[in-house]
Image (cartoon, rainbow, N blue to C red):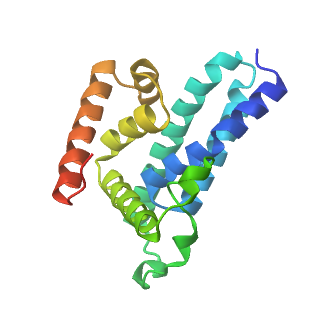
């Protein structure tokens, strides 16, 4: 059984990645924060007594379910209500969150970089972010779990509630779609 410290340490270790993953899915920072907080609360309330090695899989599954619940609530709400804010122009105040964290330089040789290369890398990362966001939901989810969360195929399948073959198919299609889209934009690996 996980101790309170193990549970706390686990939650601290996954909060940023879970938030980024949720932002990719729902494309709304406030909703993503709510989803991650709800997921953490559910893990602590219902599964805090489970062994520490089971926490990552349980959390990924809870996070996926909370995200799906959010989409269901949004669909229902949009079917019955219309928000006045939907008719307002978009604001750019969400620009202070960097989806792909700033590159941390630990090596002195990498600190001396031209402004052109920094700008070029930032533009490429932005284009990659946009292409990831354009992936179908299941492909994006599988891709992020496998390559962002560094989960293996079995863990991803358990978290997504599908077979390992489906995970491989979703990842393969995501990689192909990203490769094709980035190649069309002139970005080479």
- Image mark count: 0
Where's residue 168, x and y in %? Answer: 29, 26
Residue 4 falls in image quadrant: top right
Left or right, 131 with respect to 110, comes to left
User: Residue at horizontal 38%, vertical 64%?
Assistant: 120
Where's residue 148, x and y in %? Answer: 46, 39
Left or right, 187 with respect to 2, comes to left
Where's residue 91, x and y in %? Answer: 48, 81
User: Residue at horizontal 43%, vertical 26%?
Assistant: 156
Question: In the rendered view, would you say 82 is above or below 80?
Answer: below
User: Residue at horizontal 55%, vertical 24%?
Assistant: 57
Left or right, 13 with respect to 126, comes to right
Residue, far right:
4
Residue 105 visible (yes or no): no
Nearer-the-camera pick, 84 or 134? 134
Split into 4 quadrants, where in the image is the N terminus? Answer: top right
Residue, far bottom:
88
Nearer-the-camera pick, 123 or 81? 123
Where's residue 7, x and y in %? Answer: 75, 29
Residue 97 visible (yes or no): yes
Split into 4 quadrants, where in the image is the C terminus? Answer: top left
Nearer-the-camera pick, 178 or 189? 189
Nearer-the-camera pick, 15 or 63? 15
Question: In the rendered view, would you say 124 is above or below 67?
Answer: below
User: Residue at horizontal 27%, vertical 40%?
Assistant: 174
């Amino acid at each position: 059984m996980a101790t309170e410290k193990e549970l706390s340490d686990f939650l601290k270790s996954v909060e940023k990645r879970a938030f980024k993953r949720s932002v990719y899915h729902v494309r709304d920072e406030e909703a993503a924060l709510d989803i991650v907080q709800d997921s953490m609360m559910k893990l602590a309330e219902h599964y805090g007594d489970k062994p520490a090695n089971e926490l990552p899989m349980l959390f990924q599954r809870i996070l996926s379910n909370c995200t799906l619940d959010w989409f269901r609530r949004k669909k229902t709400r949009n079917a019955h209500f219309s928000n006045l804010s939907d008719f307002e122009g978009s604001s750019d105040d969400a620009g202070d969150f960097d989806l792909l964290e700033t590159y941390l330089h630990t090596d002195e040789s990498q600190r001396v970089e031209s402004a052109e290369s920094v700008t070029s890398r930032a533009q490429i990362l932005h284009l990659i972010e946009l292409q990831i966001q354009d992936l179908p939901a299941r492909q994006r989810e599988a891709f992020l779990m496998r390559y962002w969360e560094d989960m293996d195929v079995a863990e991803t399948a358990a978290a997504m509630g599908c077979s390992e073959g489906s995970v491989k198919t979703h990842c393969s299609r995501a990689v192909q779609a990203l490769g094709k889209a980035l190649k069309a934009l002139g970005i080479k690996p």
